[in-house]
Image: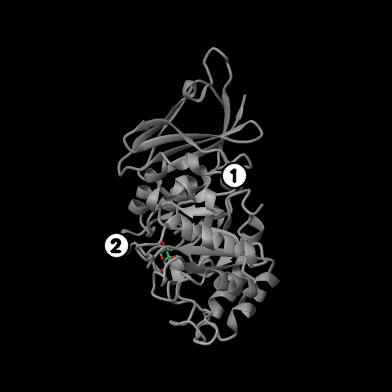
Amino acid sequence: MLSKKPPMGFNTWNTFGNDISDEVIRTTADAMVNLGLKDAGYEYLVIDDCWSKRERDPETGKIVPDEIKFPNGMKSVSDYVHSKGLKFGMYSCAGTRTCADYPGSFDHEYLDAKTFAEYGADFLKYDFCYRPDFANGPLLYRKMSMALKASGREILFSACNWGSDEVEKWIRSTGAHMYRSTGDIFDAFRSMKEIALSQIEKINYSAFGCFNDMDMLTIGMYGNGNVAGKEENNNDIDYKTQFAVWCMFGCPLMLGGDIRKMNDFCLNLVKNKDFLRIDQDEECRPPFVVTRCGDSITFARVLSDNQLAILCVNFTDRDEWGRIYFENLGLTAASGVGLHMKDCYTGEDLGVVKEFWQTRIKPHDCRLFLCDLA
Ligand code: GAL
C-alpha cells in the first residue's frame, strides 16, 4: 500500500511556478539529502505544472518535456532523483489543458500514464482545469487512477480538484492516495487560516489510503516566489503555526519553499521530530475541537502508543487564551488521570498536569503538545 502515512516531499509550484528546470530539480534533490530532509522523511520530489512543451508531439501524441527547461529529458532527471534515494513526481491535469495552459491528459490518460511510468515517476499530481462541461469529475479521477495502475509502475496518485464537488465524499473510491481539499494557498497567514478552518468539519474523511491535502506548505518563502503573499508575508511564528496545524490535521507535508535557501529556523521546524511524529502517527486519526472561542481553538488528537496531541492555536490578531479542560478529552477529574505534557516546539517538559491547563498565546501563535497519560 502506497499511502499508509501522509506523503512527504517537495513540490516546485509555490516557489518556482513556470521557472522550473533540470538544474532546479537536481540542486533541490541534492539539498533534500544534504540538509537532512530526506532522513526526516521528505521523499517525493514533484515537478508541478509548466514542465512540457505547449503542444503534444503530432506523431506520437505524447506530452513532450520542454527542451529548454529539461534539455536532458525527464528520464535523466528522474534517474538523478532516484540516485539520491528520493522518489520522483510529475504533474498533469484531468482537463484538456493544465491550469497554466500546457497539454492536459483528457482523453490521453492511458498514454500519459505510460509516459510517466517510462520516466520512472512514483507520484502524479492531477489537476482539474479545462475540464469539458460534460465530463464527470469522479470518472476522470477513476480513469487516471486505473491508467496509473495499468502502467506497470506503483505511482502515488495525488488528486487536485480544490475541494470541489464534495470531493471528500467520493475521492477515496477512485483509488487516489491524497486529495487537495481547498483552493490554492498563498504565503500569508490569512490564506493558511482560511484553509485550516474550512477543513475542520471535513477532516474525518482523511485517513490512511487517502489523505486530505491542504496544499503545499509555504514555510521559508518570506514573500518570495510564485505564491508570495505580496504585502502580507508570513513570519516565523506564522510558519510555526502553519506546520503545527498541518501536522495536527495529519496532512501530506509537501514543502513549497526553496529548500536550497532555507534558513535554520525553517529547517529545524520542518525536521522537528515531535511535530512529524504527530503528523505521521500510524493510526491516522483525525483531530477534534476541544474548545473554541471565536478563532482561538484547541484541538486534540488520539495517537498510537497511548499518546495524545494537543494544539492550541490563536488564529486571531490579538492575545488570546489557549485553554483545555481535560474532562472534554474524557479524562475525568474523579479518575485522577492527568497528562504528562511536552511542548513540541520548545522541548519544555510541563510535568504532569491535571484537570485543566491554560496560557496566554500571542497573535497567530500556537502551542503543540505531545502528551502521555499519567
Ligand atoms: C492549480 C493547483 C496548484 C498548481 C497550479 C498549476 O490548479 O491548485 O497547486 O498545481 O494549478 O498551474
Say which quarter of the image contains residue 187. bottom left
Residue 184 x, y percent position in the rendering? 38, 59
Rate crowding at label 2 as few (under 14), some (14 to 19) or many (20 or more) other CA atoms within 10 Å: few
Q: Residue at x 49, y 46 (%)?
A: 244
Instruction: Please identify the residue farthest to the top as the structure is shown.
Output: 334
Position above or below: 219 against 113 = above
Mark 1 to mark 2: distance in Å? 32 Å
Q: Which residue is mark 1?
A: 274
Residue 185 x, y percent position in the rendering? 39, 58
Residue 214 x, y percent position in the rendering? 45, 52
Quadrant of the picture in which ligand 1 is shown? bottom left
Look at the image and tell me in which quarter the C terminus lies. Answer: top right
Rate crowding at label 1 as few (under 14), some (14 to 19) or many (20 or more) other CA atoms within 10 Å: some
Q: Residue at x 53, y 49 (%)?
A: 173
Residue 252 in view (yes/no):
no
Disc sitting over residue 29 in the figure: none
Callout 2: CB less than 8 Å from ligand 1: no
Query: Do the numbered discs 1 and 2 sit on residues whose CB atoms are within 8 Å?
Result: no
Amino acid type at circle 1 is Asp
N-term-proximal mark, 1 vs 2: 2
Residue 24 x, y percent position in the rendering? 53, 76
Q: How many marks?
A: 2
Looking at the picture, tell me which residue is in the foreground, 328 or 115.
115
Q: Which residue is mark 2?
A: 231
- Left or right, 132 with respect to 126, comes to left
Looking at the picture, tell me which residue is in the foreground, 346 or 4.
4
Callout 1: CB less than 8 Å from ligand 1: no
Residue 237 in view (yes/no):
yes
- Label 2 residue SS: helix
- Label 1 residue SS: helix
Position above or below: 349 against 47 = above
Amino acid type at circle 2 is Glu
